[in-house]
Amino acid sequence: MHELVEFAVEKALELGASYAEARFEEKSGTSLTMKNGSPEGLEILADKGIGVRVLVDGGMGFASTNVLTKESVAEAVQKAVKLARAASKVRNEPIRFSDEDFHEVYYEVKMRKDFRDVSPEEKLELLRKIEEEVKATGVNVPMRFLSYSDQVWHKIIANSDGAFIESFIPRVSTTYNLVVFENGQMEQAPFVQRAFSGGLELIEKDEPWKWAVKDVQALKRLIYEGRKPPEGKVDLVISPEVAGIAVHESVGHPYEADRIFGREAAQAGESFVKPEMLGERIGSEVVTVIEDPTIPNSWGFYLYDDEGVKARPRYLIRDGIITEFLTNREYAYKLGQRSNAAARAINYNREPIVRMANTYLAPGDYSLEELIEDIKLGVYMVSFNEWNIDDRRYQQRYIGREAYLIENGEIKHPVRRPILEITTRALWSSVDAVGKEVEFYPGTCGKGEPGQGVPVWMGGAHARLRDIPLRRP
């Protein structure tokens, strides 16, 4: 594959490209599902191919093939060059890439317990463990959908500017969807995922069955003890899970440079953020939001992006100030900057576009007890069942799943579906304190046309929001 990737780059230059990159990707793995205690299926994944992207006269072209011969790769290169030439004739301005330092690098994520050496029957036992622990609670859970998946992502990336990056990243996850039916009422924990980059030992250490039991018990408590939440302006403490979805949706997405410049307007949406907002205050002084692909064993882990640029932590907000956007080489050039390695593609047959990896609210100085102790009336939102946000990522709503009343500095009974409706600026400006401990929650972030769902982590620390409006359902 090394030879084919280098051949693709050389062929593109021969055909007149001013820039060329080739990316080989191979994915292999398994997935298992179980419904209500019965195994439902085993899927084997095996997919590989090469994608080629070129610049010709300021136009960009992309093509791919899963036939790994020089003849087929040459045809893909010719198609990419032809598309780039056609694009150059209709563009108002040429596409240019930022200058970067490139390396020749090999890296891999080691597995202590290699899931490729583990039988499907042993992997299924992980799901059986979740099933058994949920049933042992004695709670009526009539619908239990469980799944397990593992994949190894092997990539080779080369470009005409000198990059040659090879990587092996294994990814492993479990997911559960549980419906509790008690006392004539139904509550559910929809598609909760636990996921990592690494071996099977990470899932075993995480013990997803304990997370499932916690959710089931919280849902039962909500059915029997849940009351209406307070309405009007109150204080709100959000958990790392809720903080995670909030930073992902209201900070990560609107800070994607392709959105800011309008490329995503007809696809994933627009952004309220403009280039001139760099340096502008968007939140309180205790709010720092970091986007970091390099977190070890994270679901969104990588050390070099799909343009071959070395990854690093990106500080989207620092002390309440907008400090950085997510960029690839194209949009870094537009901003007069260097790329911060946010170019990702989900497969060889998709072009790299600006994406998140692991986005989180940075920790502060407070324990959870300290965040709660001086709240006279408020809500602690532990998890959410629903969220939505407008396509400019400004007006948003979060509906709590597990949530509790806070009264005179103490956590009281569960409350049903407290609704937070707020703007992005009001949300982050209302934070007056942030917790010490950071937690992460996995997700699949969708974007692009054709669609690309990439693995990401979302999370951070607890945060306290002062005097914000809550609604009842």
Image (cartoon, helix red, strand yellow):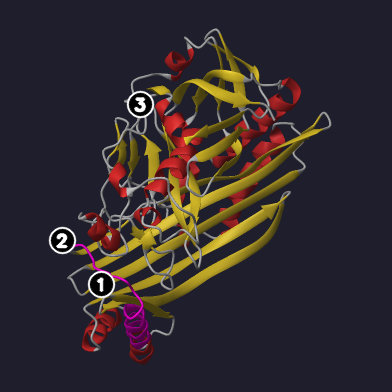
Instruction: Kindly report the distance in space between the C-alpha atoms of the residues bearing marks 3 and 2.
Output: 35 Å
Q: Position of residue 400 (x, y in %)?
A: 61, 32
Circle 2 sits in a helix, a strand or a loop, which is it?
loop
Q: Residues within 10 Å of mark 3 (few under 14, many from 20)?
A: many
Give the Cα distance between marks 2 and 1: 13 Å
Image-quadrant location for residue 272: top left
Tell me which segment is drawn in magenta: 78-101
Q: Residue furthest right?
A: 184
> Which of the 4 quarters of the picture holds residue 188?
top right
Q: Are marks 3 and 2 in contact (CB under 8 Å)?
A: no
| Three-letter residue code for mark 3 | Ser
The residue that disc 2 covers is 101
Disc 3 or 2, which lies upstream in sequence? 2
Residue 36 lies within the magenta run? no
Tell me the mark number nearer the camera, choosing from 3 and 2: 3
Residue 179 in the figure: left or right of residue 403: right
Residue at point 74% right, 32% down? 139
Residue 284 is marked as 3
Q: Earlier in the sequence, mark 2 or mark 1?
A: 2
Secondary structure state at the residue bearing disc 1: strand
Q: Which mark is residue 319?
A: none
Label 3 element class? loop
Q: Indicate which disc, 1 or 3, sits on the residue closer to the N terminus.
A: 1
Q: Position of residue 9 (x, y in %)?
A: 25, 80
The residue beneath circle 1 is 158
Q: Is residue 183 above or below residue 96?
A: above
